[in-house]
Image (spheres, rainbow, N blue to C red):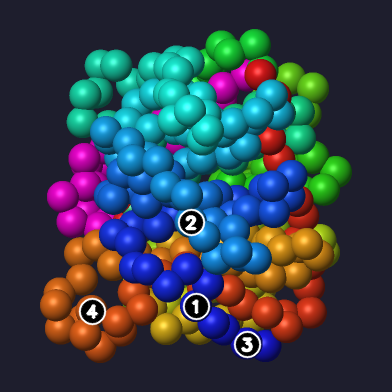
């Protein structure tokens, strides 16, 4: 196994990496930096679109371009023209809320959650976030509310289960998932974490064997866990403490890309870990991921 810097330009809060196999690029956001990035590992060029608010998630759109969950809006973004088109607004009665992590299901819906004001990382206004679903007809439904920091999402390959992380619950939860309707039922805890030992569970992805890879904010690691037994399988250490999310990418889906944040660190902490805020690549793990899904509306 080898860990190397992929994008050698620290951001504030790089997050939500997504491998876009159509363009061979890594999409990701910088939440506090208010940017959407598209990085090409072959040319090592990065294309950046500046936003005017915090942006929590980006996914490719089947019809072209990408969809972002930015501020409290879902919007289409065209990388070529830089044009942003609003699609829907959520949480309009909660002006200090913003979108956080999001991902698409196999039917092409885009799921993304909101969270409250967070003056210091993890010190968030409690229980004011919700998980939303942008359907392919562009209508939005709320799946549930009272979340703290809505984060990682993943589905089993048969689409029967959706995994979900609300960071301050220190767990991965599972729902029975109905792909045809997008309905979630039977919430239960399947993996537990201990804050002092493991860190704060943040973004995650699933590998081809159904194991989850969870970025643990604060402890500089990605944990591979088994959602069927709750077992922690292995830890991959990164040279930056605030690991925020991960996804498999590359032509063979065997490179684990890991985003990290520098926001909230003291000058001393940045000096100790100068790569904080970079995107890393982990190779030689011996596993493959599943391909990222597009929004189909
Ligand atoms: C949020 C951050 C938060 C972190 C903690 C991220 O997804 O965007 O604001 O501090 O999770 O896990
Ligand atoms: Ca996150």
Q: Within the image, what quadrant is residue 90 found in? A: top left
The quadrant in which the C terminus is found is: top right
Mark 3–mark 4 Cα distance, whole angstroms, equals: 23 Å
Q: Does the magenta stretch include residue 134?
A: yes
**Secondary structure of the residue carrying numbered label 2:** strand
Q: Earlier in the sequence, mark 3 or mark 4?
A: 3
Q: Is residue 32 left or right of residue 213?
A: left
Q: Give the foreground label among 1 and 3.
A: 1
Q: Which of 177 and 208 is in front in this view?
A: 208
User: What residue sits right under mark 4 in the picture?
Assistant: 270
Mark 1–mark 2 Cα distance, whole angstroms, equals: 14 Å
Q: Give the foreground label among 4 and 2.
A: 2
Q: Nearer the viewer, residue 276 or 210?
A: 276
Q: Nearer the viewer, residue 178 or 55?
A: 55
Q: Which of marks 1 and 2 is nearer the N terminus?
A: 1
- Residue, x 21% and y 31% (percent of image)? 96
Mark 1–mark 3 Cα distance, whole angstroms, equals: 10 Å
Mark 4–mark 2 Cα distance, whole angstroms, equals: 23 Å
User: What residue sits right under mark 2 in the picture?
Assistant: 46
Where is residue 83 drawn, in percent x and y? 44, 24
Identify the residue at the far right of this view.
158
Tag of residue 5: 1
- What are the residue bounds of the magenta stretch? 113-135
Q: Is residue 197 left or right of residue 162?
A: left
Tell me the quadrant of ligand 1: bottom left
Q: How crowded is mark 4: few (under 14 residues within 10 Å), some or many (20 or more)?
A: some
**Secondary structure of the residue carrying numbered label 4:** helix
Q: Give the foreground label among 3 and 2.
A: 2
Tag of residue 2: 3
């Amino acid at each position: 196994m080898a860990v190397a810097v992929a994008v050698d330009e620290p951001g504030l809060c790089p997050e939500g990496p997504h491998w876009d196999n159509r363009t061979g690029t890594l999409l990701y956001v910088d939440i506090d930096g208010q940017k959407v990035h598209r990085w090409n590992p072959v040319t090592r060029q990065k294309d950046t679109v500046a936003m005017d608010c915090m942006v929590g998630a980006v996914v490719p759109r089947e019809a072209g371009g990408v969809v972002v969950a930015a501020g409290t809006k879902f919007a289409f973004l065209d990388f070529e023209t830089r044009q942003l088109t609003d699609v829907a607004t959520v949480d309009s009665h909660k002006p200090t809320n913003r979108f956080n992590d999001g991902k698409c299901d196999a039917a092409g819906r885009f799921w993304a959650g909101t969270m409250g004001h967070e003056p210091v990382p993890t010190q968030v206004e409690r229980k004011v976030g919700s998980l939303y679903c942008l359907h392919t007809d562009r209508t939005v439904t709320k799946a549930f509310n009272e979340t703290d920091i809505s984060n990682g999402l993943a589905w089993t390959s048969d689409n029967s289960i959706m995994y979900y992380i609300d960071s301050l619950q220190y767990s991965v939860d599972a729902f029975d998932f109905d792909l045809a309707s997008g309905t979630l039922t039977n919430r239960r805890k399947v993996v537990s974490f201990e804050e002092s030992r493991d860190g704060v569970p943040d973004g995650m992805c699933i590998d081809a064997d159904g194991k989850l890879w969870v970025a643990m904010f604060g402890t500089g690691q990605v944990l591979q866990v088994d959602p069927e037994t709750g077992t922690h399988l292995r830890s991959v250490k990164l040279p930056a403490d605030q690991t925020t999310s991960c996804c498999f990418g590359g032509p063979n889906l065997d490179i684990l890309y890991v985003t990290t944040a520098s926001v909230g660190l003291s000058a001393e902490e940045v000096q100790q870990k100068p790569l904080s805020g970079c995107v890393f690549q982990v190779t030689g793990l011996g596993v493959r991921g599943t391909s990222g899904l597009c929004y189909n509306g």
